[in-house]
Amino acid sequence: MFDARFRSELEDLFRWRRDVRRFRVDPLPPDMMEELIRLAVMAPSVGNSQPWRFVRVDDPVRRADVRADFEACNRHALASYDGDRAERYARLKLSGLDRAPEHLAVFADGATRHGHGLGRRTMPETLTWSVVGAVHALWLAARAHGVGVGWVSIIDPDRIRAILDVPVDWLLVAYLCLGHPEEEHTDPELERAGWQARIPSQAIVLRR
Amino acid sequence: MFDARFRSELEDLFRWRRDVRRFRVDPLPPDMMEELIRLAVMAPSVGNSQPWRFVRVDDPVRRADVRADFEACNRHALASYDGDRAERYARLKLSGLDRAPEHLAVFADGATRHGHGLGRRTMPETLTWSVVGAVHALWLAARAHGVGVGWVSIIDPDRIRAILDVPVDWLLVAYLCLGHPEEEHTDPELERAGWQARIPSQAIVLRR
């Protein structure tokens, strides 16, 4: 079905799929967000429960509240580091909330009855994990369209749920910034900044 | 960077990436598992923590123990349904543990110090979620190589960790069966079996 040329391009896609925090402010093409969500929901889900819920955040007041929450959480995080590590943390740019033209919050609907509970009796987290797969699919689809994505996790999930006024059963999985990247890299920003290097793959595989 | 032809093939890949439970017994090509793991670890991870740990399970005794655990958990699950739903559940084939030539358990190392905690102070689950992304990447890479993957979640994660004798800080994310698919489908088995249909995408997007 798929040939060596496609596999090579897929590997390129995996390599270029980076967490982007530096965006151009120009808008994405019309219907791009709909297209990315259409592709994201082709991801697998436990029991075919499709628990992903997407919230497009355009309201400037809500965006400002999200950004204020990020800044508070980021200050707390900085205070947890000492010395050289704190200096390095302070220099990192950890979100593109200031400039990204699109903000997309992705939740898992913990109350969904779709899927009839199949596959999540002993591993209930698989419901949330299904949404993570959809986020990864959206990220790859975006990159294939030349769109950069950044996943912001330095936020208080309950506070974000309140800001966005969504049902209490919805669990925040990802708050995403999307837009055209200002720069392109094949290595992670945290590697370039000396925060955390790649670990060797032989360290992560066991035989049993 | 990526053209319309590649994007069309990527959509095909998303569509053909199915949960496979019916495998041929013939082995995968040599080094295929190494290749799939090499591609999987290109997935994003919080703080670049790379918490994925892979366990290739070849020992027939351990495989039999895993299969016995699945069968026990599946009996309990069946007992939780009534009437027509129970009959439908009983007819489903929910794992390929009996025939798949490769078994791969994927864990999140909850004790890793890589990443120095970045990005997971307020959302600690992002460590585990990073591993989910790697599983999704591996699944896509496998399908691009013509290899089918099935994710078994009807198992007791603590029991699987004990059977595989891995560190207690490792959290089971996925137990995967891999092999050549016996049949090919673009629709989920649970849709074909009348368990859970596709839900309309307009039901899952809000504006705020």
Image (tube, coloured by chain):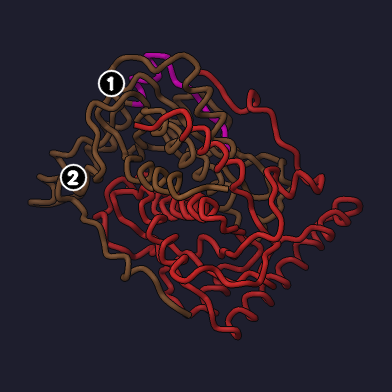
Chain colours: A brown, B red
* Location of residue A40 with respect to B128 vertically, above or below: above
Where A43 falls versus B83 (above or below)? above
Q: Is residue A169 visible?
A: no
Residue type at mark 2: give it: Ala
Q: Is residue A57 magenta?
A: yes
Q: Residue at x 52, y 18 (%)?
A: B207
Magenta residues (range): A52-66
Rendered image: mark on residue A79: 2
Q: Residues within 10 Å of mark 2 (few under 14, many from 20)?
A: few
Q: Measure the C-alpha gap from mark 1 to mark 2.
A: 25 Å
Task: Name the secondary structure under disc 2.
Answer: helix
> In which quadrant of the rendered view does residue A51 lie?
top right
Residue A2: give x, y in percent of width and height. 53, 47
Q: Secondary structure at mark 1?
A: loop
Which residue is at a point 33% across and 57% down the rendered structure image?
Answer: B50
Residue type, numbered disc 1: Arg
What chain does badge 1 belong to?
Answer: A
> In x, y percent, where is residue B60?
60, 84
In percent of the image, x 40 and y 24: which residue is there?
A103
Which of the pair B186/A58 is nearer the observer?
Answer: B186
The subunit carrying tag 2 is A
Q: Is residue A29 above or below residue A180?
A: above
- Is residue B177 rendered to the left or right of residue B194? left
Residue A31 inside the magenta-drawn segment: no
Mark 1 touches mark 2? (CB < 8 Å): no
Q: Earlier in the sequence, mark 1 or mark 2?
A: 2
The correct choice, above or below, for A53 with respect to B196 in the image is: above
Location of mark 1 (residue): A99
Q: Residue at x 64, y 23 (%)?
A: B202
